[in-house]
Amino acid sequence: MGIRQDLRVIRHMVFRRGDKAATHADRMESFYNAQAQDYDEFRKRLLTGREEMYAAVPIPQQGVWVDMGGGTGWNIENLAASIDQIKQIHVVDLAESLLSVAQDRFRQRGWENVTTHVADATMFRPPEGLADVVTFSYSLTMMPDWFKAIDNALAMLKPGGIIGVVDFYVSRKFPAPNQKKHGWFYRGFWPNWFAIDGVYPSSEHLPYLNYRFEAVDLLEAKCKIPYIPLVRSPYYRFIGRKPVN
Ligand SMILES: C[S@@+](CC[C@H](N)C(=O)[O-])C[C@H]1O[C@@H](n2cnc3c(N)ncnc32)[C@H](O)[C@@H]1O
């Protein structure tokens, strides 16, 4: 991707935020509709650790996988080698323009067991009733009611079902002893910087995931952000299991 396309995406990210839209769904569509075709190329460099998160989730044999805030469906490419082993994958998003890119992708691949849904992650339930896996890739930070989205995932998962999350975050000032601590600059700078785009890295997502699920795998790391020199943004990968009892 050239600098021109980068600038086009950045211009849309900064000036087409949809702040005047009436609902969250309208805001998402307004933010994404002009950048849907360029989305994948730019996000490859912005959203670190997505492949690793999808690779860390055990494939549910003939099970149901719900990808919340799944956008263009780029992440489902990570499941290509196992797609036949999964009964049904539901890609859920509020931005129709991104889902239409996803639909084209799945049609071209001939994946009939992957379907898209214009729906809210806080309410969507798979037609099968229960899910074996629910994933959130850089989507929780765009969901104002992220706690409802996590509760909804917990409710739809079978006992022992898996949640996978990768996203930006910052630590609490005083995190749990086994978790990373970020200094005041990180805790102040990144939430404010990302908020320009309606992305809200939080100190509370990870503690809430740890509270609701049994942690199977946790990575806390930092990644480069295109065009921001010197500093790196904290992100995490969380794989958790719904308690059986
Ligand atoms: C940064 S994008 C990530 C897309 C994709 N998961 C990826 O990794 O490229 C965040 C996505 O979350 C979606 N989103 C935000 N709030 C949502 C909600 N309440 N329900 C469903 N999707 C939502 C946005 O429309 C957007 O597609």
Image (cartoon, grey):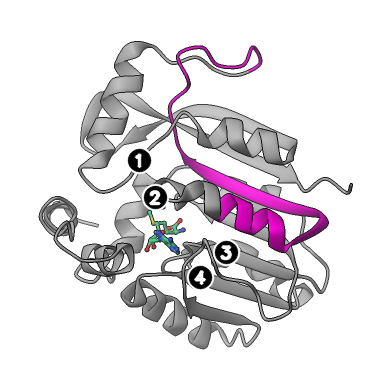
x then y, percent, for residue 206: 57, 33
Query: For numbered disc 2, what is the local secondary structure?
Result: loop
Q: Residues within 10 Å of mark 2 (few under 14, many from 20)?
A: some
Q: Is residue 170 magenta?
A: yes
Image marks 4 and 3: residues in contact by CB distance under 8 Å: yes
Image marks 2 and 4: residues in contact by CB distance under 8 Å: no
Q: Which residues are magenta?
A: 149-178
Image marks 2 and 1: residues in contact by CB distance under 8 Å: yes
Image marks 2 and 3: residues in contact by CB distance under 8 Å: no
Q: Which residue is mark 3?
A: 67
Kind of residue at badge 4: Val
Q: Which residue corresponds to the image point at 29% horizontal and 21% vertical from the top-left?
A: 188
Kind of residue at badge 1: Tyr
Query: For numbered disc 4, what is the local secondary structure?
Result: strand
Q: Is mark 4 within 8 Å of ligand 1?
A: yes
102 left or right of 37 in image: right
Q: Earlier in the sequence, mark 2 or mark 3?
A: 3
Q: How many numbered marks have been drawn onto this rendered protein structure?
A: 4
Q: Which residue is mark 4?
A: 92
Q: Which residue corresponds to the image point at 64% horizontal and 57% vertical from the top-left?
A: 153
In front: label 2 or label 1? 2
